[in-house]
Image (cartoon, rainbow, N blue to C red):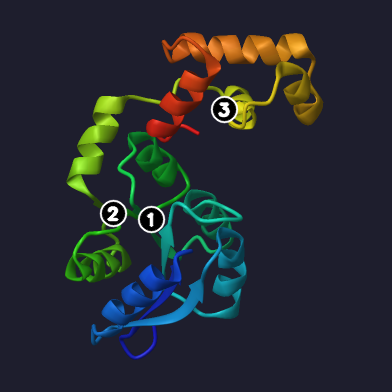
Amino acid sequence: MSGGTIKVLLAEDQSMVREALAALLGLEDDIEVVAQAARGDEVLAAARAHDVDVALLDIEMPGLTGIEAAAQLHQEFPALKLVVLTTFGRPGYLRSAMEAGADAFLVKDAPAAQLAEAVRKVLAGERVIDPTLAAAALAGGANPLTDREREVLRAAADGSTNAELAVLLRLSQGTVRNYLSTAIQKLAVRNRAEAVRTARDKGWL
């Protein structure tokens, strides 16, 4: 942090939203957006190219999600503060973001002053979580799916058959069927389409 200015990396795929956020944060005397990324897989390179104090990451981005990008940043720059922004208040996202090393988790349409305040707070060592999202995450419970079950469900989201999934994931058809049926059971739904929808709604995929 040079001369008291907090240097921010802003990652958001919608250019209008990104530019609006950058402009609003730029109005703060002590905050400067020094780097921007439109894709999750551009975030790490942007952080390497610029000396930043805080990264603001939208969850829904092409290439990598904001949570995956946060995990990469946390591994390479453990001192970098991470603020994850979401349009969707899915409870599973909060848990995943915290596991990835996020210091703050906020809804994207929060007032700009609240976002600026969150940037200052995480830099001071505080953790900032939207209270509504925190309550929803606690009520939602933990993700019951294993990594492999999530992987199979994600792959099944486009309607692929078990045979196609087996080739794609290099598993036997029986194994694919077992993973899907266990996931359906755990989520208490009737079929794979409902399993995908439920897991997505909870932020577990």
Above or below, 110 relative to 7: above
Residue 121 relative to residue 68: left or right = left
**Residue at image location 25% in from the left, 64% down from the top:** 118
Quadrant assignment, res 48:
bottom right
Above or below, 201 relative to 19: above
Residue 54 relative to residue 29: left or right = right
Per the image, the residue denoted by label 3 is: 150
Dot 3 or dot 1: first in sequence order is 1
Front-most of 90 and 162? 162
As drawn, the label of residue 84 is 1
Residue 84 in the image: state x and y as whole percent: 38, 55
Quadrant assignment, res 187:
top left
Residue 22 in the image: state x and y as whole percent: 35, 77
Residue 151 in the image: state x and y as whole percent: 62, 30
Give the spatial CA distance, label 1 vs label 2: 6 Å
- Asked if the residue at tag 2 contacts the one at tag 1, i.e. Cβ–Cβ closer than 8 Å, the answer is yes
Front-most of 21 and 163? 163
Q: Amino acid at mark 2?
A: Leu
**Residue at image location 58% in from the left, 53% down from the top:** 64
Give the spatial CA distance, label 3 vs label 2: 25 Å
Residue 190 in the image: state x and y as whole percent: 46, 9
Give the spatial CA distance, label 3 vs label 1: 22 Å
User: Of helix, strand and loop, which one carries label 1?
Assistant: strand
User: Of helix, strand and loop, which one carries label 3?
Assistant: helix
User: Would you call the spot at circle 1 few (<14 residues within 10 Å), some (14-19), or many (20 or more)?
Assistant: many
User: Would you call the spot at circle 3 few (<14 residues within 10 Å), some (14-19), or many (20 or more)?
Assistant: many
Dot 1 or dot 2: first in sequence order is 1
Per the image, the residue denoted by label 2 is: 106
Q: Residue furthest bottom?
A: 3
